[in-house]
Image (cartoon, rainbow, N blue to C red):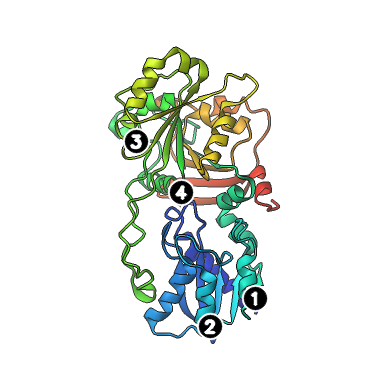
Amino acid sequence: MSDKNESYMQTALKLAQRGIGSVEPNPAVGAVLVKANQVIGKGWHREFGGPHAEINALENCKTLGVNPRGATMYVSLEPCCHQAKTGPCTEAIIAAGLVKVVVATIDPSEHANGKGIEQLRNAGVEVVVGVCETQARLLNAPFFKFTATGKTWVILKWAQSIDSKVAYTDKSRERRWISGEQSRKDVHKLRRRAGAILVGINTVIADDPLLTARPVRSPHRKSTGALQGLTSNGARPSKGKKATRIVLDSHLRIPLDCKLLATTKEAPVLILTSQQTLRAHSQIVEKVNQKGAEVLAYPDAPARSNLYFLTSELAKRGIAQLLVEGGPTVIASFLKQRLADEIVVYITPKILGAQGGVGINPPMAELTEAVDLYNVDIKRFGDDVRLTGLSKKALDEISICP
């Protein structure tokens, strides 16, 4: 039975992955209904504010014409028992007549933290907790960190050639990117996860980026086969989350005609500068504000890191995930200050030599300590290779032993 429990939970976890990029800052959750050793319903949390995985799985049963009474539900996170944007999942489970719920891990949120499990047990539903728990916690690591510590999950991302160059010296259209098209599409998936996307001012001056996720993902794309009818609430397709776009700009060098400042109505822009610059360049601050961007100044305290100030400020604003897409100096700064939780590197099979511009190695050489990565995943995107790993600090904060 233990093997079957794990097998069904693995299915629930795979379903949950489909919500990543659409549900944040909520956790990604999947659910599977089983009756007489047959899967009779599947569901996952498809978008922020929409029905939860449990509700979608029960709805899938109805679509297939199956009565879920007497079934077992496998769900990757403790069912909610509070009224939020949607009704309590525990009440729906009890009303459907399920006899057993297998939960991967407890939801550590203040409104949950075992309350949902307690409510199910009080109603006579058997509850088993802890099946595939580590995988479930890793799947929603940013959620668990933010809930447990109140701190923002920091993702460092860059692309490089084999000889560690991150850009061409020639910035023609044909040589605008180091990585291939499939890798760039994957980066947009990363952007959809994040509540904020950060670059340094040199990147803005050199590349004039938009820093938006493209194309916008619609979580209500048409389903086929056994999963048809998973969503029947008539909601319109999501227009996508609007991540805050952040520029590290200590001396307020941001061009007033850049794409970021031209698109502040589409997504927020935050410029991080120093108190000294704020006082010395009030006219530039006013012009930036008139374009709809916010200027935030870090304190004039030499002993205090402006990056710690920024990540603390983002946490106060409820931003659970920060994607750092800056150049080598910005990347190395986050590593030096031990702020990185997740590292994503795209390696393209090119040796640029003299055609390569900025290299990642010089700033990295200034790190005084090695950075070990855990739970490493390697995946191919066309000819590129993506390497993803978590820091020891990140695992400690979500209570997972490396």
In the rendered image, which residue does mark 1 sit on? 121
Residue found at the very far front of the displayed protein: 83
Which of the two discs, 4 and 1, sits closer to the camera? 1
Q: Name the secondary structure under disc 1.
A: helix
In the rendered image, which residue does mark 2 sit on? 97
In the rendered image, which residue does mark 3 sit on? 210
Q: Position of residue 159 (x, y in %)?
A: 46, 37
Neighbor class of circle 3 (other Cα within 10 Å; few <14, some 14-19, many 20+) is some
In the rendered image, which residue does mark 4 sit on? 193
User: Considering only vertical position in the picture, is 278 above or below 52?
Assistant: above
From the viewer's perspective, is 185 left or right of 89? left
Residue found at the very far top of the displayed protein: 280
Q: Name the secondary structure under disc 3.
A: loop
Disc 3 marks a residue whose amino acid type is Leu
Disc 1 marks a residue whose amino acid type is Arg
Reading the chain from its start, which is encountered first: label 3 or label 2?
2
Disc 4 marks a residue whose amino acid type is Arg
Reading the chain from its start, which is encountered first: label 2 or label 1?
2
